[in-house]
Image (cartoon, rainbow, N blue to C red):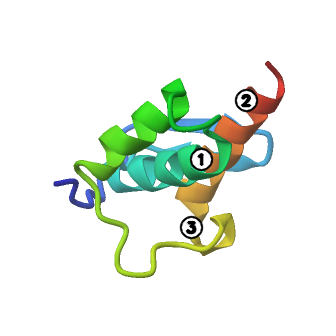
């Protein structure tokens, strides 16, 4: 299972947001991204979402949208969305 770590090892600026390395935030952001942006059950994104869910449990109600992410996870999510939309 994934557990939260509070270590700030590396930062990266994306436009106006600063991201730092936190495993839990990374998993949360990727979970939200692949929940919104996979292309169906047989897509690579769905495979990645399934892999995340094999190790991460978002809770009974999960998250309804990206606004429920903390600022660091939101910055990671926004970066994933920007990369996906610029392909």
- Identify the residue shown where x is 61% and y is 74%: 64
- Identify the residue shown where x is 24% and y is 48%: 54
| Crowd rating for badge 1 (residues with CA inside 10 Å; few <14, some 14–19, many 20+) | many
Query: Front-most of 7 and 63?
Result: 63
User: Which numbered disc covers residue 33?
Assistant: 1
Label 3: element kind: loop
Inter-mark Cα distance, 1 to 3: 11 Å
- Identify the residue shown where x is 56% and y is 51%: 35
Question: Is residue 60 found left or right of 66 in the rendered image?
Answer: left
Label 2: element kind: helix
Residue 58 percent location from the top left of the image: 37, 67
> Which residue is labeled 3 in the image?
69
Q: Name the residue furthest left.
A: 1
Discs 2, 1 touching: Cβ within 8 Å? yes
> Is residue 62 placed above or below 85 in the rendered structure?
below
Q: Name the residue furthest bottom.
A: 61
Specify the quadrant of the image occupied by residue 32: bottom right
> Which residue is labeled 2 in the image?
84
């Amino acid at each position: 299972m994934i557990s939260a770590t509070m270590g700030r090892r590396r930062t990266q600026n994306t436009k106006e947001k600063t991201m730092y390395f936190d495993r839990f935030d990374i998993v949360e952001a990727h979970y939200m991204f692949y929940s919104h942006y996979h292309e169906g059950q047989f897509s690579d994104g769905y495979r990645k979402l399934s892999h995340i869910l094999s190790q991460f449990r978002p809770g009974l109600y999960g998250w309804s949208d990206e606004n429920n992410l903390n600022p660091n996870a939101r910055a990671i999510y926004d970066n994933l969305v920007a990369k996906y939309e610029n392909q």
